[in-house]
Amino acid sequence: MTKLLASVSIALSLSLAPTIGMARPIAPHNGGTKLGPDFQIAQYQPPGNLGKPPTTGGGTRGTSKCPLDAELPNPQPPLTPLMPLLDPNVGSVGLTVSEHPEFFVYVPETSAKSAEFILKDEEDNEIYQTSLLLSGEAGIVSVSLPEDRGPLEVGKNYRWFFAVICDPENRFDELVVGGWTQRREIDEDLAAKLERKTRPSDRSFIYAQNGIWHDALSILASEIRQGDRGNLAMVKWKQLLESAGLNKVTEVPLLLSANDGSDASEEQLPSLGDLLAPRGDR
């Protein structure tokens, strides 16, 4: 049996997570546009030296909704990783300077009760796996690499997967999305710019302008969750998503990231890692 079966599902319960709020329809702003004297809108600038991961991006598997959701309208948008939409030959790739980055996914309305997140390195070794309880409502959820796990290594590519488990007894019916992530070192110029900025929104702007996707997005998400200047944070959140080609998810709720430690499943069922593993490892 593959070593992935030995992974313990650590749940991040989302069933009780309240909605922070939905960004109101707001006219787009150009990158760098001032909204008053004290802050700028973050706009993502794709890095020019990203290179190409070992294989193409995360992609999707299955249909746009679970079989049990047949009575629901086709989700618009469907299950979507919040990753910059770059060259389709490269796939969804995001940079981070964090040792333990945060990953975001839009989950449409569904009857599915749970989801699974897996992070792997370039050699297909599992770095982290966790299960999540879903509330059923549409919204953006997030998963962070825990501090007690080893940090991402600088310069290495990591592939991550997010699966909505439609039927725990038939994992081949699930919906899967994902992308690639690479950790970069903060160079002296970027470090100097960040040191001069103390407000989170300003730091998000600098990260976005330097192609550091995960950190720019995570900072704004934290601002919204904390209710700090909430409406302005949502303006910047929307603009950042639009600038990365994620227009379809700019008006959906951002759900609280949960970490209550409860388990999403009591049974030892096949994991997403088992389904992704080469057949010789099963």
Image (cartoon, rainbow, N blue to C red):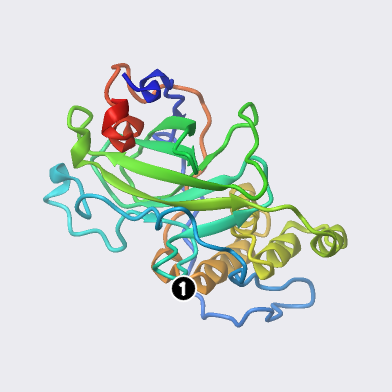
As drawn, 37 above or below 96? below
Q: Is residue 161 visible?
A: yes
Left or right, 135 with reference to 158: left
Left or right, 71 with reference to 193: left
Q: Residue at x 45, y 60 (%)?
A: 92
* Along the line of sight, the residue nearer the viewer: 142 or 280: 280
Left or right, 40 with reference to 9: right
Label 1: state its secondary structure: loop
Q: Residue at x 47, y 46 (%)?
A: 159
> Which corner quadrant of the image does residue 265 belong to?
top left
Q: Position of residue 18 (x, y in %)?
A: 46, 42
Badge 1: residue crowd in 10 Å (few <14, some 14–19, many ≥20): few
* Along the line of sight, the residue nearer the viewer: 37 or 40: 40
Left or right, 36 with reference to 96: right
Q: Is residue 224 visible?
A: no
Q: Position of residue 78 (x, y in %)?
A: 29, 58
Q: Amino acid at mark 1?
A: Pro
Q: Position of residue 136 (x, y in %)?
A: 31, 42
Q: Which residue is mark 1?
A: 25
